[in-house]
Image: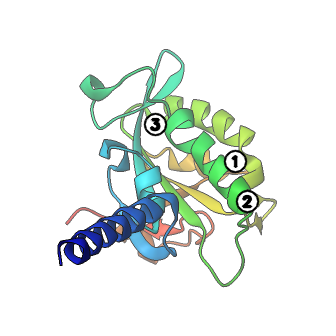
């Protein structure tokens, strides 16, 4: 009887341990409407969202000494928490490993970048960084959309005219409710949000 109980408990522990381990190694099917707000505050930014199937994440950024640092406020910033390190490089690696190209039937993964201050200055640096990742970012060139797995959308202190003038352009703009009646195309403004 003791052996039976011991084996049952051991089997239960192994099954629970293995299922937890498997959950940490695999990715859930995409949840296209799931968004990780302030994702960088998670223990494993981006990775936790991807493992749980989230198909949109938000990163707040500040420009500090020429580098784009991620954090909600300036007192949270750290030189080792850059946009490249936490989001751009890992996203590129993820989609290269998955060989997952965007197709017409599935929406792209959304990287929502919230510029906290100095929109024009930040965007100049951001635009140059995004250009380096153009092989996996939605690109808008001469009125055409070049589909790739990741779509960048700029929120916060958005330099709308500056972004709209880019050609090629590697990011869209997070619009406001007042933009619903404007003539701005959805390629420029793929997302509309507002405070509530």
The residue that label 1 is drawn on is: 166
Picture quadrant where residue 109 is located: bottom right
Question: To which residue does mark 2 refer?
Answer: 140
Question: Of circles 2 and 1, which is in front?
Answer: 2
- Between marks 3 and 1, how big is the CA–CA gap? 15 Å
Residue 37, quarter of picture: bottom left
**Label 3, residues with CA under 10 Å away: few <14, some 14-19, many ≥20:** many
Report the residue at 24% width, 70% height from top.
Answer: 9
Image check: 133 left or right of 155? Answer: right
In the displayed structure, 105 sits above or below 147; it is below
SS at badge 1: loop
Q: Residues within 10 Å of mark 1 (few under 14, many from 20)?
A: some
Instruction: Give the quadrant of the N terminus.
Output: bottom left
Distance from disc 2 to disc 1, alpha carbons, whole Å, reads 9 Å
Spatial CA distance of label 2 from label 3 is 20 Å
Outermost bottom residue: 105
Nearest to the observer: residue 89 or residue 70? 89
The percent coordinates of residue 103 (x first, y second) are 72, 77
Disc 2 residue crowd, few under 14, some 14–19, many 20+, Cα 10 Å: some
Nearer to me, 28 or 21: 21
Residue on which disc 3 sits: 119
Indicate which disc, 3 or 1, sits on the residue closer to the N terminus.
Answer: 3
- With 161 as the anchor, is 43 left or right in this view? left
Q: Residue at x 27, y 75 (%)?
A: 8
For the residue pair 26 and 75, the one nearer the viewer reads as 26
Tell me the SS state at disc 3: helix
Q: Going by the picture, which residue comes out furthest to the right?
A: 142
């Amino acid at each position: 009887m003791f052996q039976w109980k011991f084996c049952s408990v051991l089997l239960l522990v192994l099954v629970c341990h293995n299922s937890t381990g498997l959950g940490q190694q695999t990715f859930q099917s995409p949840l296209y409407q799931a968004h990780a707000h302030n994702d960088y505050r998670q223990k494993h930014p981006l990775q936790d969202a991807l493992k749980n199937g989230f198909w949109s994440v938000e990163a707040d950024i500040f420009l500090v000494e020429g580098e784009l640092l991620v954090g909600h406020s300036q007192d949270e910033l750290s030189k080792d928490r850059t946009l490249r390190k936490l989001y751009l490089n890992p996203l590129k690696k993820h989609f290269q490993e998955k060989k997952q190209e965007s197709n017409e039937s599935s929406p792209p993964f959304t990287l929502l970048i919230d510029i906290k201050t100095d929109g024009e200055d930040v965007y100049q640096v951001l635009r140059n960084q995004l250009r380096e990742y153009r092989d996996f970012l939605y690109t808008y060139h001469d009125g055409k959309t070049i589909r790739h797995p990741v779509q960048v959308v700029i929120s916060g202190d958005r330099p709308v005219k500056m972004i709209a003038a880019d050609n090629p352009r590697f990011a869209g703009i997070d619009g406001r409710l007042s933009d619903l009646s404007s003539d701005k195309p959805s390629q420029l403004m793929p997302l509309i949000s507002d405070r509530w």
